[in-house]
Amino acid sequence: MWTSYLEDLDNVKRLADGAPIVTIFNGDMTQGVGHPSHLVSTRIVDQFEIAYQAFRPLMALPNLRTLRIASGTASHIFSGQTSPLLITERLKAQCPAVDIETVFHGLGSVDSFTIDYAHHGPSSGIRFWTRGNQLRYYLKSIMLKDVADGREPPEMVTRGHFHDFWPETVWVLGKRDWKSDIILLPSYCGMNEYGRQATQSRSSFSIGLVALEIENGKLVNTHPFYRTPDLRTREEL
């Protein structure tokens, strides 16, 4: 996980090539104590230290301008935004030049390109042949609600929680047309016993991040830096 994380940050650094970097972290920086089988230490303070140390390579990226941290799952972050608020304040003290805040649900604008981000949302689907359906319906609902209320829909929606990478695009056509994208983001977390049960023994998950290349308020390209390891044990019986 750590090697993949550093490789991905290096890819982002090369891609940015000196341009400003805005980072959105979509939640769950700590494991919590609800499912202790995934812990490397039983001391709660160590979880906060591990999270802080994990952010340090990110904070070292040249031209990092903004960091937004979305609150995650209560059982993972010790409820009440505990983990993200503690880490946010520590990062602020160490990196005063970077704009750092924690939010429950954000609607950010990067050079007029709007991104709706939060931790919880739909999954990519529990069956391969239905993958993406929930994401499309979810995004279409957001778009139609905004159009009905006289607002511009966000151009990008990101969600996390399911440790999977999956992108979808939706068009809403009328007197004028709207187009938005949604990305279910990968993570840097493995699978424990609870995860195997909750996902009905999925055979793979995604590790990585997604970089959005934005120029003059337009999404120029989407760069997914991820890998999908197979969890099955292969052997001759």
Image (cartoon, rainbow, N blue to C red):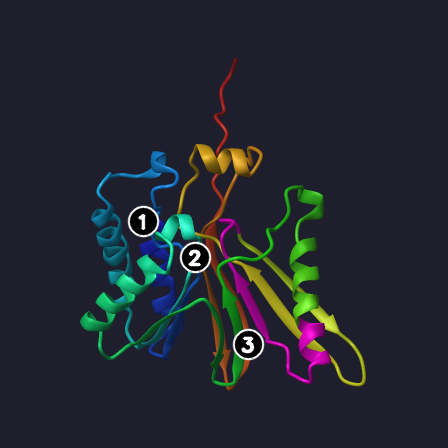
Mark 2, secondary structure of its residue:
loop
Label 2 or label 1, whichever comes before in sequence order: 1
Q: CA distance from mark 2 to mark 1?
A: 24 Å
Q: CA distance from mark 3 to mark 1?
A: 28 Å
Q: Nearer the viewer, residue 88 or 97?
A: 88
- The quadrant in which residue 220 appears is bottom right
Specify whether residue 60 is in view: no
Which residue is under mark 3?
219
Q: Amino acid at mark 1?
A: Thr
Q: Which residue shows up at 66% across the image and 62% down it?
A: 138
Q: Amino acid at mark 3?
A: Leu
Q: Which residue shows up at 37% across the image and 59% down it?
A: 80
Label 3 or label 1, whichever comes before in sequence order: 1
At label 2, counting other C-alpha atoms closer than 10 Å, the crowd grade (few under 14, some 14-19, many 20 or more) is many
| Magenta residues (range) | 143-164
Image vertical order of residue 162 relative to residue 97, above or below:
above
Label drawn at residue 3: 1
Which residue is under mark 2?
72
Place of residue 214 in the rendered image (x, y in percent of width and height, measured from the top left): 49, 78
Q: Residue furthest front?
A: 80
Place of residue 119 in the rendered image (x, y in percent of width and height, measured from the top left): 48, 59
Q: Nearer the viewer, residue 46 or 205?
A: 46
Q: Residue furthest right?
A: 175
Mark 3, secondary structure of its residue:
strand
Q: Amino acid at mark 2?
A: Gly
Give the side of residue 23 with respect to residue 221, left or right.
left
Do labels 3 and 1 touch, CB within 8 Å?
Answer: no
Q: Nearer the viewer, residue 117 or 59?
A: 117
- Tell us which disc is closer to us: 2 or 3: 2
Give the side of residue 16 with respect to residue 178, left or right.
left
Label 2 or label 3, whichever comes before in sequence order: 2
